[in-house]
Image (cartoon, grey):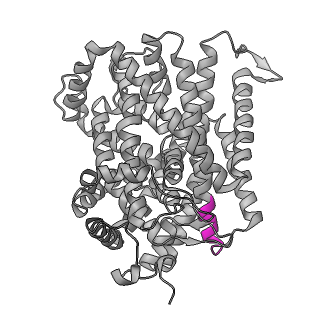
């Protein structure tokens, strides 16, 4: 079974998907005339404004909800893995994916707003399944995406986040005497297994307390936790860099030289740097994957492009700040390994350590002894936990789509229990299998969504031009799809 999933993952994540993600980002950047550059000030202004309502959340809450999905294990362990298998140059290609992905995020999130609707409980719902059906008129395609998303975010991807939580806490316990001894047996079970299972049960109970409160509770938790933890993590990276200031110029030189294949040690890894940089960049910032639009559709805004701008800004924050913070923690301290596909060790800075969050922990420990393991474990817990919360919301939205835009209590209960069970299970399975299943989920969604938004990009471009036109007139833009020739945007249509 493991061999099958590994082969399937290799098929999904072929070079074709890498090219599709980069190509779509470049195409949307050109089509929007690089709105991620021209509109940066407007992105920032809109991010911290906006109103919420009984039906929807504020722009900032929608941002926090989408960021809780974006900022997860991919921002720490994912970056470390990219460096381990793609070399330091992978960081540059993550930046490229983040820059281009901002325009992709604008397109998919604006489409989510254009084609959103209310469910039978009066809450905003939207996402790829909705805009595929309404915008492309392809019901079968929409159903395929909804089913793939429920499988991915409901059952495949939570295990990656939960596994990282358990591993990081276990690593912390192994580095301190404050935790119980994890050697030997506990109640007839391997002590480490029993400890991780206990972590899983606690995380599952915490998750239940939040997701049973619905979207409002999820958004409220994300609004508080995500910005605080992200800024604390970035601050720690800045501190580590300042303490290694002499090596910082060398670090940048290594990144750029290996990104273009001219570094003496990592030059031969150019193809791997691009592959792993794009792959982990997508996993981290989720641009084009189709996850962000679910949260974007929940925002209360007067014009769809507003939330498109906000979600483009989210990609910058995720990739350029949080992912970069991890890269600098690792590279500025030299606490990483680089291994080629045939097993050749190109660089060994942490002897015997597998690629993952341990690199970041070792990086902090090297300059701030006693801080690394605990701080990264705490960061990973909050990042991963809030990501699982966001995954549940995405799965629930697609379940609502499948049930005819109506919330079915028993189906919702089954989904909640299912994602809690998969979270607990994820803490005790191997990291390799967790990542493989997670990659399959990300890849499936990316294939389906990027093809869809390439086919359906026109309404998002019309919305951007309309928004910019109204801003030049000094107006607070509002949206009238009929006057713009956009069909099936029923939520926005003015009553006759």
Horizontal side of 203 relative to 73 (left or right) equals: right
* Residue drawn at 54 percent across, 19 percent down: 373
In this view, 430 is above or below 187: below
Horizontal side of 192 relative to 318 (left or right) equals: right
Chief secondary structure of the magenta portion: helix
Residue 235 visible in the current orientation: yes
* Residue drawn at 59 percent across, 20 percent down: 171
Residue that extends furthest to the left in the rendered view of this protein: 262
- Quadrant of the rendered image containing residue 433: top right
Residue 490 among magenta residues: no
Residue that extends furthest to the front in the rendered view of this protein: 474
Residue that extends furthest to the bottom in the rendered view of this protein: 496
Residue 404 among magenta residues: yes
Which one is nearer the viewer's eye here, 292 or 465?
A: 465
Residue 62 coordinates in the image, percent (x, y): 52, 54
In this view, 301 is above or below 231: below
Start-end of magenta stretch: 396-405
Q: How many marks?
A: 0
Residue 211 coordinates in the image, percent (x, y): 69, 50
Residue 84 visible in the current orientation: no
Residue 227 coordinates in the image, percent (x, y): 50, 38
In this view, 435 is above or below 376: below
* Residue drawn at 39 percent across, 29 percent down: 325
Which one is nearer the viewer's eye here, 462 or 336?
A: 462
- Quadrant of the rendered image containing residue 244: top left
* Residue drawn at 30 percent across, 58 percent down: 24
Residue 328 coordinates in the image, percent (x, y): 35, 25
């Amino acid at each position: 079974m493991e061999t099958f999933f590994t082969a399937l993952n290799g098929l999904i994540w072929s070079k074709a998907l890498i090219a599709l993600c980069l190509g779509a980002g470049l195409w949307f950047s050109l089509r929007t005339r690089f709105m991620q550059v021209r509109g940066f000030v407007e992105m920032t202004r809109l991010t911290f404004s906006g109103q919420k309502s009984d039906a929807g959340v504020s722009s900032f809450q929608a941002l926090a909800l989408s960021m809780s999905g974006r900022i997860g294990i991919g921002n720490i362990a994912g970056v470390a893995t990219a460096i381990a298998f793609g070399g330091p140059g992978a960081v540059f290609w993550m930046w490229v994916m983040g820059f281009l992905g901002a325009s992709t995020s604008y397109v998919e999130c604006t489409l989510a707003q254009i084609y959103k609707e209310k469910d039978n409980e009066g809450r905003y719902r939207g996402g790829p399944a909705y805009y595929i059906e309404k915008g492309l008129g392809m019901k079968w395609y929409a159903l395929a995406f909804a089913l793939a998303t429920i499988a991915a975010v409901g059952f495949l991807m939570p295990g990656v986040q939960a596994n990282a939580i358990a591993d990081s806490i276990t690593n912390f316990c192994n580095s301190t005497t404050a935790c119980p001894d994890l050697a030997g047996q506990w109640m007839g079970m391997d002590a480490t297994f029993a400890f991780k299972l206990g972590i899983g049960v606690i995380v599952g109970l915490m998750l239940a307390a939040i997701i049973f409160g619905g979207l409002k509770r999820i958004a409220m938790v994300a609004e508080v936790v995500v910005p605080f933890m992200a800024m604390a993590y970035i601050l720690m990276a800045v501190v580590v860099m300042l303490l290694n200031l002499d090596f910082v110029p060398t670090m940048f030189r290594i990144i750029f030289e290996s990104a273009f294949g001219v570094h003496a040690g990592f030059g031969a890894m150019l193809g791997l740097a691009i592959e792993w940089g794009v792959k982990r960049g997508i996993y981290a910032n989720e641009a084009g994957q189709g996850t962000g639009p679910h949260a974007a559709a929940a925002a209360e805004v007067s014009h769809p492009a507003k939330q498109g701008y906000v979600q483009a800004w989210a990609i910058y924050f995720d990739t350029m700040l949080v992912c970069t913070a991890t890269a600098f923690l690792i590279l500025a301290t030299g606490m990483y390994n680089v291994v080629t596909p045939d097993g050749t060790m190109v660089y060994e800075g942490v002897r015997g350590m597998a690629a993952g969050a341990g690199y970041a922990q070792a990086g902090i420990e090297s300059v701030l002894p006693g801080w690394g393991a605990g701080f990264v474990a705490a960061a990973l817990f909050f990042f991963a936990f809030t990501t699982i919360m966001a995954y549940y919301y995405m799965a629930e939205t697609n379940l609502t789509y499948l049930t005819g835009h109506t919330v079915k209590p028993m189906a919702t209960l089954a989904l909640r229990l299912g994602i809690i069970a998969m979270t607990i299970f994820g803490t005790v399975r191997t990291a390799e299998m967790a990542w493989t299943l997670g990659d399959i989920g990300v890849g499936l969604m990316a294939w389906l969504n990027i093809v869809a938004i390439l086919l359906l990009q026109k309404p998002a471009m019309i919305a951007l031009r309309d928004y910019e036109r109204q801003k030049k007139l000094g107006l607070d833009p509002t949206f009238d799809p009929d006057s713009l020739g956009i069909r099936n945007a029923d939520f926005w249509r003015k009553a006759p």
